[in-house]
Amino acid sequence: MSPKPNTPNGARLSRREALRRGLCGAAGLVLTQRAGSHAWAAAAPDKAPAKPNAGPQGKVKAKSVIQIFLWGGMSHNDTWDPKPDSGREYMGEFSQVIPTNVDGIQIGAIFPELAKQADKYSLIRSMTHGNNGHETAAYLMQTGHAPGERLAYPSVGAVFALFKSPGYEGIIPPYVVLTKAQGRFSEEGFLGPKFKPFATGGDPNASRFEVEGVIARAITDDRQKARRELLGKMNTMGSAMAASPQVVAAEDAKKEAYGLILGAGKDVFDLSKEKTELRDRYGRHTFGQDCLVARRLVETGVPYVVINYPGGWDTHKNHFQTMRRQVPQLDQGLAMLLQDLKDHGLLESTLVWCCGEFGRGPKVDYQPPWNGGRNHYGKVFSVLVAGGGFKGGRVVGSSDAKAENVKERPVYPVDLLGSIYQLAGIDPAARLPHPMGLEAHVLPAPSESVKSAGILTEIM
Amino acid sequence: MMKTPIISAVVFVATATVAFGASPNLFESPTPPSAANEIDRIVFAKLSSLKIQPVLCSDAVFVRRVYLDVIGTLPTAKEAGGFLRDPNTGSKRSALIDRLLERDEYADYWAMKWGDVLRIKAEFPVNLWPNAAQAYHRWVRASIAANKPYDQFVREMLTSSGSNFRAAPVNFYRAIQNRTPDGIAAAVALTFMGSRVESWPKDRAPGLAVFFSQIGYKPTREWKEEHVFWDPLRSSVPPVATEAPAPTTPPAAGEAPAPTPPPAPSGPLKAIFPDGTKIQLPPDRDPREVFAEWLITPKNPWFTRSVVNRVWAWLLGRGIIHEPDDIRSDNPPGNPALLACLEKELVAGKYDLKRLYRLILNSNTYQLSSMPRSNTPQAEIQFASYPLRRLDAEVLIDAVNQITGTSDLYVSPIPEPFTYIPHDMTAVALADGSITSPFLALFGRSARATGMENERENKPVPAQWLHMLNSSHIQRKLEQSPRLKAIFEAKRKPEETLEELFLTVLSRLPTPEEVQNALGYASAVAPSGSRQGAKPAKTLARNDWIDITWSLINSIEFLYRH
């Protein structure tokens, strides 16, 4: 139908594609040797007024970020800000604390593994925003902007995808979510669908981690290639209109997709390449294996990985039962992730942060219908940060005797996110490209509605 | 159950092959287009000045296009085949348009489009809450089904008072992120004037906000019920507190931003209409009514213009003023006469929207081929061809589900208890933007946060291709489809099976070349060298048929309106 040169498998061979194949064939480094612009990189702001990475900061310490999001909000006084003298009314069933490997830091006794790693992380015990709605609080914690403005801001991950894509040459999308997107707010905000996180789907704890769209069950590479060739022949209208800009855009995106389906990039999701013993140490549960995949992803240079905790922390009811079930997995996976990053020499360049959108009521609600639950609490809660330029073995701020209010050094969302951006070399004041050209910045400047107590210089 | 339709389909396919086996062009009609109505006279005159000779689309292209555009639904094989075989070539297109305008899916589809613009969503960021989102959507859908005149439709939204559950149009004033007079003014301008206040002279937006400075919101004892009313004395308290004390917060209760009402006015209010006219508001009238009176009249320079431009953009893929919600003096219409003609027609029809649809759909301008006729930017601006656009997320998944006879799960995880939608409901019919699926999110369904047209994002990204080409979601549908199984396993020649498959997926019959390519396909089981011969395979394996169907749903022709 068309006189243009065809590849052996029927697809038209573009200059770019030819260039890429040449490179891959020569070097065999599919993961890093992407030529020219591709769709993930094309994600770079078309007309962003600010130059990416043009912040005042010097060295980029955090090359990658792993964000572990405890959707629903994890209790702070049961976990990383225990108050052993606050009485049963507050402590409920978790009255024990344990020392850590850092003098003077104690955490809840339900975290024996994290207690051995305290030199690698710092705990913020004075995180605060005062918001008790899931979506609004999640929006605050992941954008730093007040909810309810006319603009819908992108999440931290989408901002990373925007600023890190130009220098990122991996074949895996720059913003990956294990395994499901939250879907509570549009993470890409006004940046548009290119900046949506790539949600893997599947279960890394299954015998085969079937990453949705990348690794298909029971379809061999031969069948993939045969199908692709067939599609090339059956795409009658697409071929007849091959020069139309819409068809060109579609074909370019499709080519990128095939780079993952048929390329070597997907090996990063193949956990059988890891030692059985290591997989066991991460824990043979979804969260543990999520952590292992996250390490493999940052190892290949993916700038932003989110683990949405597989299971919620919104424990209005059955609080203590849920905690007993989930905390050991969180403890094992997160502690092992820090250890393993360290062992691979990646902790220095990988920033890890872990928290929910808020904490939970420090006082147990024994009234019906909660019957011993904890409700939403945004006034004060805890965040764990590690690596990527954050110091370990420190505690930032404190809450009062019953973990009800900030006592010292409040940390607001813009302070936490501002610190993360700074360590990653992203200027928090940089302008974001808005489709209508409206003025929008990575983080809001401090104001009455956006409180700030300064970035976390004490642990940077 | 499945037997009867299959047998009739076999009979039909046999006759169909004879009827139009020798079509000269798949996508275009050999008949040169003539001006069918005033729209065409205006558009064709422009095209002729650009030296562009437009070409009509074929019947096969038309039937698919008009189903997707009017009811957001793919024609079934039977519907497509019936249309193609209909010998009344002179009148069958307009007869089909009339039939489609009366279908139930017409109301579903256009309620979805208006739902984007009106931001019908229970949760973040507009926070209508579930009951009100359902009530609002039901009212919008019923208005569309009854073909309520557009002026009345808008007047009800602008001037109603009462409970958000019972007087559903009051939800217009609730489906706004920023429920201050300024925020409401911006939403009114965007929704009903197709204009963005950011582009206005400085005093105009605050002047408009005055009309909305006396809206009261009052909660009742029913959960999330709220009365919206004229409150000249500012007696009502803000609807929700920003920081509810934690222990008393009900589960999963998000908080809407609290509007801060301006202090009670001391003297008579002075407002400014968007055209600059100043007015002192009479103390005995709801200012919303004063504004509605100014807006909703044929003389108003925005009201009629914005809706005809919107409808045109929805059907033709591009506004005469582009973007369709960016009307301002320095963004002139590409063809002012065309816009004026549509305005005149809508006024003459007393704001009957179906009449407007009928006029546009029956024009040969709408029925042009989608093959680009020229590379000049003017060709696009002057509608020289029907623009290629990817199917909306909801339309696309509904089409896949219709072909395969499968369904998707739509869920809203908040508030508890979770909402699950019955499996036979289409995505197009979903009322509430909070009720969703990963597919809808991935394919750019509107977030319904701002009500801007560009919130719906149909540009292709690689992750969407990963999903269509290789996800277990789509593969499972193909493998487990009862409908495809019936087609594959009916006892007939492979050529006939292929024709049925093409009608089902692409609403047309295959070309001889496509027949050869498909029947020559034997998937990965055969060594790759032996595929070159394209020998007529007697029996294609089930997986081969799945792969052929897979290739059709991944074709541009399937994925794009054309």
Image (cartoon, rainbow, N blue to C red):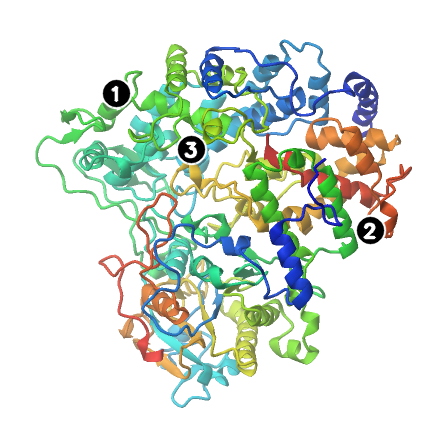
Along the polypeptide, which appears first: circle 2 or circle 1?
1
Graded by Cα atoms within 10 Å as few (under 14), some (14 to 19) or many (20 or more), the crowding at tag 3 reads many
**On the rendered image, what quadrant is the C terminus of chain B found in?**
top right
Quadrant of residue A128 within the rendered picture: bottom left
| Residue B562 left/right relative to A444 | right
Q: Which mark is residue B252?
A: none
Tell me which chain the residue with mark 3 is part of. B
Kind of residue at badge 2: Ala
Q: Is residue A252 above or below residue B342?
A: below
Determine if residue B281 is in view: no
| Residue A437 left/right relative to B562 | left
Quadrant of residue A360 within the rendered picture: bottom left
Q: Position of residue A86 (x, y in %)?
A: 35, 78
Give the residue at mark 1: B293
* Contact check, label 2 and label 1, Cβ < 8 Å: no
Residue at 43% of width from left, 55% of height from top?
B251
Give the residue at mark 3: B136
Residue at 86% of width from left, 33% of height from top?
B494
Kind of residue at badge 1: Glu
Residue furthest toward the left?
B267
Along the polypeptide, which appears first: circle 3 or circle 1?
3
Q: Is residue A275 above or below residue B103?
A: below
Tell me which chain the residue with mark 1 is part of. B
Q: Which mark is residue B524?
A: 2
Tell me which chain the residue with mark 2 is part of. B
Residue furthest toward the right?
B538
Between residues B1 and B556, which one lies in front from this camera angle? B556
Residue at 30% of width from left, 20% of height from top?
B296
| Residue A320 left/right relative to B177 | right
Residue at 43% of width from left, 39% of height from top?
B454
Q: CA distance from mark 2 to mark 1?
A: 68 Å
